[in-house]
Amino acid sequence: MHTLTRNSRPNGFVSRILASSVLAAATMLVAATATANTINFDDFTLDGSGFYNGSDLGGDFTVGNGTFNATFNNTFSFGCCWDGWSVSNHGDTATPGFGNQYSSITGGGFGGAGQFGVAFTDSANITFASAENITGTYLTNTTYSALSMLNGDSFAKQFGGASGTDEDWFSVTVEGRLSGAATSSVEFFLADYRFANSVDDYIIDDWTWVDLSSLGLVDELSFSFASSDVGDFGVNTPSYVAVDFITSIPEPSTGLLCALGLAAMPKRPRRSQKV
């Protein structure tokens, strides 16, 4: 015989306690499973040159949870040309021109040293083995791009022009894709000379966090460039961006989500009967 007393608890109370325990356990399991992934390029092995651009014709390469496309055209005797992605540890912030295309304007990777990725031209993309929620990444200019915009060169104009008032700009757009379909995109200005007060004009010269969470769940990222300086063959500004610490959170498995959903369902309390 069961009767309610001062110290007893109804079955509904017990059910709620059990449900809460299961919900907490399931939540912790999902959180543990969805640990953030970070690509910082330091795990990639470089030779004595301090950079990799696919010249070994190895094709796409993997760093962390991402696969980076790398294409190298070995048709010409001087080993030209690459596009897509390279990995570098170069930190020459003073030498202008194409010969210094693998250096970041900060002098190294995020934090001041180490390796980083370099995206070049609109062909650069990253694919993930499974869908990820991209949190964001750090971006900065390469030395080649930054000094070209600051001073001009034989291919591209000096930003601001001779008067310093030309409304020039240079940007990179990161687009998310899921199963081949675009989700959303984020445009980040690597330089902007369109302010009413020229004192506010800038060329990015430090590692800057770019929030990519608005892209949603993706299995691919693509990078593209745009500039106010455009010629017959497209963008004149050197189309590079240095990238480091790409951070993402994996999509929780269906089983975990189901477990979490079931645990969260309200339980129908039993009626206590006095016998």
Image: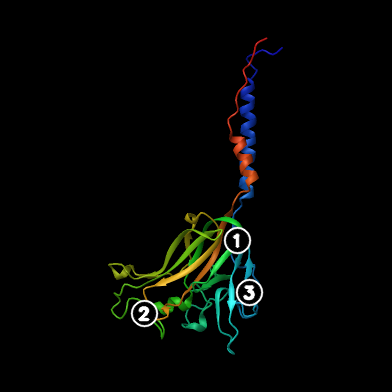
**For the point 50% across and 64% down, which residue is it?**
138
Q: Nearer the viewer, mark 3 or mark 2?
A: 3
Question: Could you tell me if residue 110 is visible in this image?
Answer: no
Q: Is residue 98 above or below residue 214?
A: below
Q: Which residue is mark 1?
A: 128
CB-based contact (under 8 Å), mark 1 and mark 3: no
CB-based contact (under 8 Å), mark 2 and mark 1: no
The amino acid marked with disc number 3 is Gly
Question: Could you tell me if residue 11 is visible in this image?
Answer: yes
Quadrant in the picture for the C terminus:
top right
Nearer the N terminus, badge 3 or badge 2?
3
Nearer the N terminus, badge 2 or badge 1?
1
Q: Is residue 127 left or right of residue 194?
A: right
Q: Residues within 10 Å of mark 1 (few under 14, many from 20)?
A: some
**For the point 45% across and 61% down, which residue is it?**
186
Q: Residues within 10 Å of mark 3 (few under 14, many from 20)?
A: few
Q: CA distance from mark 2 to mark 1?
A: 38 Å
121 and 26: which one is in front?
Answer: 121
Q: Secondary structure at mark 2?
A: loop
The x and y percentages for residue 220 are 55, 62
The x and y percentages for residue 91 are 53, 76
The amino acid marked with disc number 1 is Phe
Q: Which residue is mark 2?
A: 158
264 and 105: which one is in front?
Answer: 264
Q: Which residue is mark 3?
A: 59
Q: Is residue 7 above or below residue 232?
A: above
4 and 218: which one is in front?
Answer: 218
Nearer the N terminus, badge 1 or badge 3?
3
